[in-house]
Amino acid sequence: MLQHGADDLNMIAAYAAKGGHISIVNAMIQRGAKDFNWIATEAVKNGHAKIVEVMMQHGANDFELLAITAAKSGRLDIVIVMIHRGETNFNLLANKAAESGHLYIVDTMIHHGATELDWIACHAALGGHLNIVEEMIRLGATELDWIACRAALGGHLNIVEEMIRRGATELDYITAYATMGKQHSIVKAIISRLIK
């Protein structure tokens, strides 16, 4: 029989949850694992909705954390469950989904009431997701300079160039963000534009 402290049991349960092994999770809970939010969060990362449900029955209640993790992991089904549990920060969830490249979650959050299109575009730019940036611009995002800055910080020259092509003009700020992100190729590309 396993002889472990509560921390060990929580860790074993969390790893089991990440792998979808509900029987091991249940065994660790019976032995004393109690960090239900951590266990549920690990289950969310790989889309193990049944384990998430079981953890909520045991007391997992950090719905914002679970929703954020689901949005970042591309798990719309779990995001929806968290919305039904009361998580309503649709802008935050859209930002996290955008940064990870999950347009379908961004669209769903906009449908539910996310309105901060410029911030969503900035998060998408930081993550390198031009398709989401373009969709947010199509829907009304206008802060091209800030979008370019976030793209520069994340090292995404293609997005920086597209924002400049569309009208971003604050090359000094864009260069500063590229410098903060240690994105030397972007700094060089912008300086070469300035020299021309």
Image (cartoon, rainbow, N blue to C red):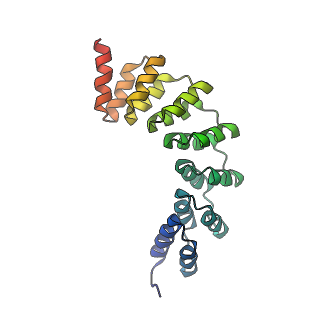
How far across and down, in percent of the image, does residue 110 sit? Answer: 65, 37
Observer able to see residue 184: yes
> Which residue sits at x=48%, y=28%?
147
Work out which quarter of the rendered image holds the C terminus and state it: top left
Q: Which is more toward the observer, 180 or 44?
A: 44
Q: Which is more toward the observer, 58 or 185?
A: 185
How far across and down, in percent of the image, does residue 69 sit? Answer: 54, 52
Left or right relative to 181: residue 34: right
> Which residue sits at x=39%, y=36%?
154
Q: Is residue 86 above or below residue 13?
A: above
Q: Is residue 95 above or below residue 41?
A: above
Q: Residue furthest right?
A: 84
Left or right relative to 86: residue 42: left
Q: Is residue 163 above or below residue 65?
A: above
> Which residue sits at x=42%, y=31%?
151
Q: Which is more toward the observer, 3 or 97?
A: 97
How far across and down, in percent of the image, does residue 183 sit? Answer: 32, 33
